Image (tube, helix red, strand yellow):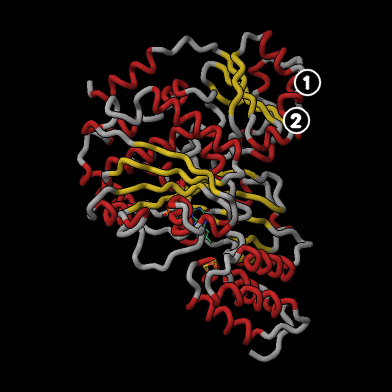
Amino acid sequence: MTIQQAFLKTILDESSKHSIAQLFIHKGTCGEATDIVSVCEELGIIELAMSLNAKIIETSCDGRCWAAPSVTAQKNNDRGASYSRRFDRIDLGVNLKELGEVLDLSTVHNVFDDGATGLTSRFGQLDGSLLAAVELGAYGVAEKVFQQDQKSILSKIEESKLSGRGGAHFPTGLKWKLAAQNEGPRYLVVNAEEGEPGVFKDRHLLEADPHRLIEGILICCYAVGVEKAFVYINGQAHKGIESFMTALEQARNSGITGPEFLPEKMTVDIEVRAGAGGYVCGEESVILNSIEGARPVPRFKPPFATDQGLWGMPTVINNVETLAAVTTLWQDFPPPTKLVSLSGNIARPGVYEVPADGTLSWNGFLLSVGAELETVPAILLGGPSGTFVHRDKFEEQIEMKNIGAGGIFVLSPNSSVKEITNSLAGYNERESCGECTPCREGTMRLTELLQQETVDLKKVEELIEVMEEASLCMLGGMAGRPVKSAIENFPATWISTER
Ligand SMILES: Cc1cc2nc3c(=O)[nH]c(=O)nc-3n(C[C@H](O)[C@H](O)[C@H](O)COP(=O)(O)O)c2cc1C
Ligand code: SF4
């Protein structure tokens, strides 16, 4: 038995016998917003569960934000019973087994057909304890990975072709390798800023399965040789901060971040920093400045963070989902999935885990989440730097490289593409930090140009080109993307002068 195996066994041995029936109350941000606890009391759901000797567990959202307020019942580890107040179909006389027939389970958050191995496999099932997380597999991958040397782990990450889930899809293996080959001390920064409108999947990960993130952090730290990691969380993500801090304390107190569990007598110090919130605060070099206590504006690149990041030392910066996805790679068939945040004109908004390997079309995805396709003129992929996918292209397959950070906003027949585009342009203007002229002046000029009755498309194109070429960071560099995409996909919307 390895030290990691022995260690995990000590946690599991503490396990008390679970009640056979369990009632999960989904008390994530969406559950709280819909006052789930009062709803349960009012409808006598808690009383019902108690009379059936069910264990009552307060847990996170399971990705089905659309169903909130909701509960899920489980019997003999056989998950499959959900009730949602929104759909008001419960008969309180039913027992837990019958509760299983209440909500159509084909609508679960996981569009990936093997829900057991993906990133969301523990969503909505944990009670906030380390024990529950370990029982459902947390730290089991690290336990195996820590038997390997750093070089093998770095090769595995490269071979897996894991790409950055923060939106740019930079190869994670290469990033880790570049930092590892530089002299330390090295740092890891976890980007949990998620200030982009319409993206809420990292918050779900923090709230629903924080130990998965800690496991990914520890694997990265071992592979790259890092002993200090910062987790930079959006200061407005109160529940995410609370949930992650609790898990971190559990991991620290039980020795998971120290030599009892880590190889080579390593200790990893993980520190949480809460950012002020704002779109540009998620740009990686802004985070570096913010952690150092400097003015939170982007840095010139190069040098890149893997060479000179925090305090001039090699630094890996990864998105929450990227590190969480690391824990899914050591399987025969790693799930080829991406988390998406779905909102807009859709019956079931929420967080979904979708295959992004070209096996699912937009049509297929939209149908599976309750879209009435004839009412969807387009979707917007990503927010202020996103692109439109016109309904004529819904037959196309979902590919990782096209999906950005995974924000999907579904337009309705009443949506005005022009209004949405103008509003995104205005957003970029307001969020521009003002540090460089092409973006500070360019976003303002772009908004003005778009508001003209007759839009001068030639001027718009030229301005966007300057912003793309000369902006200091990609807020300015990509501010023209939705505009270009709107003009290309909906040309009739733009009454223009000659191009
Ligand atoms: C304006 C702007 C906002 C960004 N916001 C985020 C964010 O909220 N979360 C994130 O992980 N990456 C964000 N990024 C991308 C990061 O700069 C960086 O590429 C990413 O954190 C790297 O991690 P990854 O390789 O794991 O994706 C943003 C980039 C820009 C230009
Ligand atoms: S591109 Fe915009 S957000 Fe980025 S540094 Fe320049 S002014 Fe600031």
Point out residue 128 in the picture as x, y percentages from the top left corner.
Answer: 52, 25
Examine the rendering and report whether any part of residue 429 can be seen. Answer: yes
- Along the line of sight, the residue nearer the viewer: 167 or 90: 167
Quadrant of the rendered image containing residue 226: top left
Assign the N terminus to one quadrant of the image: top left
User: What's the mark number on residue 141?
Assistant: none
Is residue 444 placed above or below 404 in the rendered structure? below
Sequence order check, earlier mark of 2 and 1: 1
Residue 269 quadrant: top left
SS of the residue at dot 1? helix
* Mark linked to residue 85: 2
Identify the mark at residue 43; answer none if there is no mark. Answer: 1
For residue 128, above or below residue 413: above
Q: Residue at x 59, y 27 (%)?
A: 59
Q: In this picture, is 182 found above or below 224? A: below
Q: CA distance from mark 2 to mark 1?
A: 9 Å
Residue 56 in percent (x, y) is at 62, 17
Instruction: Please tell me how crowded label 2 is: few (under 14), some (14-19), or many (20+) other residues with Cα within 10 Å.
Output: some
Identity of the residue drawn at 35% across and 62% down: 304
Measured as percent of width and height from the top left, residue 379 is found at 64, 60
Q: Amino acid at mark 2?
A: Arg
The three-letter amino acid code for the residue at tag 1 is: Leu
Residue 399 in sight: no
Identified at 34% across, 53% down, the residue is: 315
Verify CB contact (< 8 Å) between mark 2 and mark 1: yes
Q: Quadrant of the C terminus?
A: bottom right
